[in-house]
Image: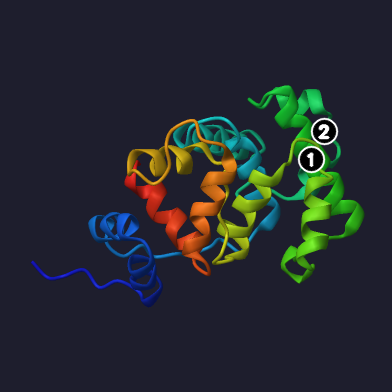
Amino acid sequence: MEKVKLSSKEKYLGEVDNKLKKIIEKNGHIVFKPNRKNQFESLVKIIISQFISTKAANTIFLNLKKSLNTDSLQPLVFRNLSTYEIKKLGLSVNKSRSIKSLSDLFIDQNFTDLKQLSEDDLHKNLLSVFGVGNWSVSMFEIFCIGKLNIFSSKDAALRISMNRFGMIKPESDLKFYDDYAERWSPYKTIASLHLWKAID
């Protein structure tokens, strides 16, 4: 069987972490393609994904677009909808408030490309949205902006994967996960992708 061709980033990660090396070799090369096209829609999907499985989130997200009869979610779609009306589309009260707050932010600040903001301004603006915390910001930085050095110890799946492969003992403080992940710098994102895939 032909040997899987890994990227230079994946090879580097294998050199600095033998446990991760085994995961990468089993996974094979992962193509990292951030979705930079619709930042607002990406953030809506991230909000929906909070605390539920990827499969459930995808179903709710597709149903939301179908209910709104649109192929592309835009801030103006939610402008004249109340939180209650958004909730009726299949979302919890808190997630409805989050999406409403997010749409208001995009409209009020006339945001078209959050990538143009400094890291501090990006975090400040997104964290001002109701229900958006550091995990959501990290997921946006990975899957929409495409930053290569992001790891979130607040992500339960990443912690489970690190526990399963003997990197960190279960129930350890988040600090231990963050400290361990430092060895993956400057490619923490690529390491995260492999940890997710390993338990998918």
Residue 133 position in % (x across, y down): 72, 42
Residue 52 position in % (x across, y down): 53, 30
In this orientation, which residue lies closer to the viewer: 144 or 196? 196
The answer to the question of whether label 1 and label 2 lie on touching residues, with beta carbons closer than 8 A, is yes
Is residue 6 in sight in this rendering?
A: yes
Badge 1: residue crowd in 10 Å (few <14, some 14–19, many ≥20): some
Q: Secondary structure at mark 1?
A: helix
Report the residue that reaches farthest toward the left: 1
- Could you tell whether 136 is left or right of 105 in the image? left
Q: Residue at x 74, y 30 (%)?
A: 96
- Gap in angstroms between the C-alphas marked 1 and 2: 5 Å
Up-down: is 50 above or below 176?
A: above
Q: What's under tag 1, amino acid-wise?
A: Phe
Q: Residue at x 83, y 61 (%)?
A: 121
Up-down: is 50 above or below 110?
A: above
- Could you tell whether 106 is left or right of 147 in the image? right
Which residue position holds label 2? 81
Q: Residue at x 47, y 63 (%)?
A: 184
Residue 87 position in % (x across, y down): 72, 24
Is residue 154 in sight in this rendering?
A: no
Q: Secondary structure at mark 2?
A: loop
Which residue position holds label 1? 78
Q: What's under tag 2, amino acid-wise?
A: Leu
**In which quadrant of the rendered image does the C terminus lie?**
top left
Q: Residue at x 84, y 45 (%)?
A: 128
